[in-house]
Amino acid sequence: MESPVGAPSSTSSQGLQEGRVLCTAVWPIGTNNSKRPIPNPKAQGSDPLVHQGELQHMAAELGSYKQAHTSPPPLTLGNSRVVEGPAPLKELGSRAQAMRGGPQCDSCHVQHLIRSTTDHIIHFPSLFILPGCIPFLPKTMEEATKVTETPPPLLERRVRQQQPTVSVLKSKLKKSVTCSVPRVRSTLTGFFPVLRWLPKYKLREYVWGDVMSGLIIGIVLVPQAIAYCLLAGVEPIYGLYTSFYANIIYFLMGTSRHVSVGIFSLMSLMVGQVVDKELFLAGFDLNEDFTSSGPDVFNATLGTNLTAGKIHTVELMGLQCGKECYAISVATALTFMAGIYQVMMAIFRLGFVSVFLSAPMLDGFATGASFTILTVQAKYLLGLKIPRHQGYSTVVVTWINIFANIHKTNVCDLITSAICISVLVGGKEIQERYKDRLKIPLPTELVVVAGATLASHFGELNSRYGSSVSGHIPTGFIPPQVPSFSLMPRVALDAIPLAVISFAFTVSLSEMFAKKNGYTVRPNQEMLAIGFCNIIPSFFHSFATSAALAKTMVKDSTGCQTQVSSLISALVVLLVLLFFAPFFYALQKCVLACIIIVSLRGALRKFKDVPAKWRASQNDAIVWLVTMSATALISVELGLLVGVVFSMICVIFKTHSPKVSLLGRDNNTDVYEDMDEYKDLMPPPRVHIFRFQAPLYYANKESFLKSLYKAVGVEPFLEMTKRRKAEKKAKEMSLKQPKANRDKNNDEVVIGLVQRELDFHTIVLDCSAMPFIDSTGVLAFKGLVKEYKEISVSVLLANCNTAVIDSLQKEQFFGQNDKDMSSLLFHTVHAAVLHANTTFAAAESRLGNSEV
């Protein structure tokens, strides 16, 4: 075996320590050593152990010489690689004579010298063989061969006893039904985290930041709650209900200190699409506005709606329900189902579903949905009364309808929209430019709503110019009502994406701001909290909620410390519900549409980031583009599904065609890396090291085999076929020769035609980048070992993790009782390479001895 001196291996170290080495006497060459006399143990008539101090002194000189000299060019002797020193041969002979102490070499003494200095010798780069040791080479080579045939030991695995599943379930069930005071307290504080942190509330330290952020969020929340009802297809009062109840419930059950849960544009859009679909199927006119004009009519719509103009009614829960009643009934049934799904996901710990929603996919989905929201609200900017399109391609069809009815634009609404958008965008730009100087965000939305309401009321824009207004918003609360169970089967499927998206946004925002502010959240409790933020409010005429990024960032930037700020925001909404709601009667819908559209600036700005995304990761950029396009051009629900499926296909594609590489060794180290990626790497002689950077499973087995065959340049089945054909041809040629020469030349002809010397004898599979392997992958490994063995090529495994090793053991890859594990599996690539070279050298030696 050829190995550079100075690169110790487990086998060489073991041989040195046992005194069975190829070179039985080595010594560094230097002037100081040559001048110092070497004692002769025979002359003194004592055991070599007497000279332990002298030998330790020699070992010290070995180390000092190693620091002062560089490695000279190598000299090969037999199968061992040694190094020639700079001293003349005459000096070598004299020093060897001194070491021997006579005409015969004292093997015992020399071996003791090796044992005494083995730790220095195996790391020493400038050693030479003493001439007096040459007579012992054949014997020591034979012993070395016997030692190196023993493979290096593997690490011993811990024995883990896995308990039976039944006993585990019994213990968990017993633990869950056990009742005690500490367990009840732990359950309550876990279900209502407010009981844990509120008693520890630092009033002087936290109250100012919580009150300020709560007031600001409440001021921002009121106009947004009214505006987002346009997206949800319900009356403005229900948006205020939703914001109020969601803040209260999350205050009690949430684990995040900064997340703002409430009405969200994306959730409102998804609810509105389902509401419009069900209204259309129930026979209502989607182009017809809600015609409630007072509190009496409003309350009547919850029961029997006999108002003039409400000709079409639907029986629901034993009552005749008009368009407004039916719309909120659909929204509450949808919200209830979404909450049930979220609570079930929390109970069965199915939070892992959110891992399939990658960040590029969620960004693309939000951007596509934002473009859909912009399209849906565009008609309000122009004052057009066109129904929302039902079905796919909402964006395309809506824009076609807008341009087809552009001549019906309401000039009053158009001017109002232009003014409001200018003020809102200007306020946002000032906020962003001077955010370091402004301690609180500018209440631009509230200013616009107040100014537009006053202008509409005193200018009589509704009666004089036909501008569409919000209408009457009653004060107080409507009595709770159970969601319609008859509608739930119809919206059950639509509630699934709503539940997943709501949970995904809430958990991701919770974890993001928890990491930023140095605390932890419980994702499972977050799922429970957002689930109950949907279930309980659905009894109080509210629709789906979620965490909102913009409001959460405002809370964080205004000094929010705990969820007490949510309680303050709920109080602000409560004041509007009790006292100020009727004042928004004259508020134009185009103003609400402007608030919605300006709030989409962040998501729509993602289009500018596409080139940067492409440069950073083409895969992520493609996922973003596909998800955004599907969401905007097909539908929101299908866009989410397309995004998830396409993201998974991209992952499967990357594992199906992963990067593969042949590894080379860094000079004088045990580091092996990709030769295509790093410079100055040399492949081990006659050994190929192959790395497959993906899990090996049924989908990429063929890719793995093809890439391996291409990398090493030999496909075993084809090689065997070629050899069989050559053997057949050789036999035919031998039959054509004269009989006298046939027997003499037969063997030579067969050997000449059949035997084809390969440029490698071993393939080492580096499994460091292989996280797992399935049964198909194990069968591929078995086939490789068997097929390459037929052409005299060994296949070894290195750097396998425990999951891969367990899979191999279960499929008996290492034979019965893992008898071949030590010869097939290695902890490092270097150990596998050393074993391969040692085994090949031993096989060559046995072959040479048999020929002799």
Image (cartoon, helix red, strand yellow):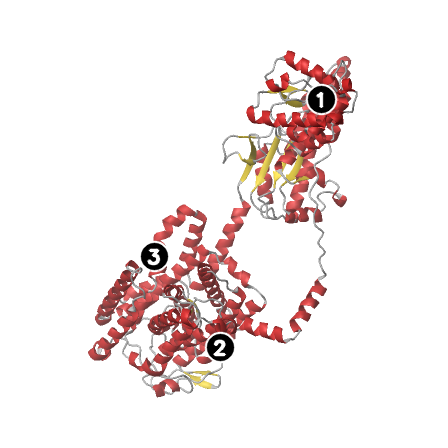
Q: Is residue 773 left or right of residue 167?
A: left
Q: How far apart are marks 3 and 2 (CA)?
A: 36 Å
Label 1 belongs to which residue? 750
| Residue drawn at 65 percent across, 48 percent down | 802
Q: In this view, does 54 lie to the left or right of 631?
A: right
Figure check: 839 above or below 194: above
Query: How would you rate the neighbour count of disc 2 (Cα within 10 Å): few for under 14, some for 14-19, many for 20 or more?
Result: some
Quarter the N terminus occupies = top right
Quadrant housing residue 163 = bottom right
Figure check: 791 above or below 605: above
Q: Is residue 7 left or right of residue 562?
A: right
Label 2 belongs to which residue? 536
Q: Percent from the top left, x then y, of residue 192?
A: 52, 73
Label 3 belongs to which residue? 605
* Element class at badge 1: helix
Q: Percent from the top left, x then y, of residue 625?
A: 41, 53
Q: Percent from the top left, x then y, of residue 675?
A: 52, 34
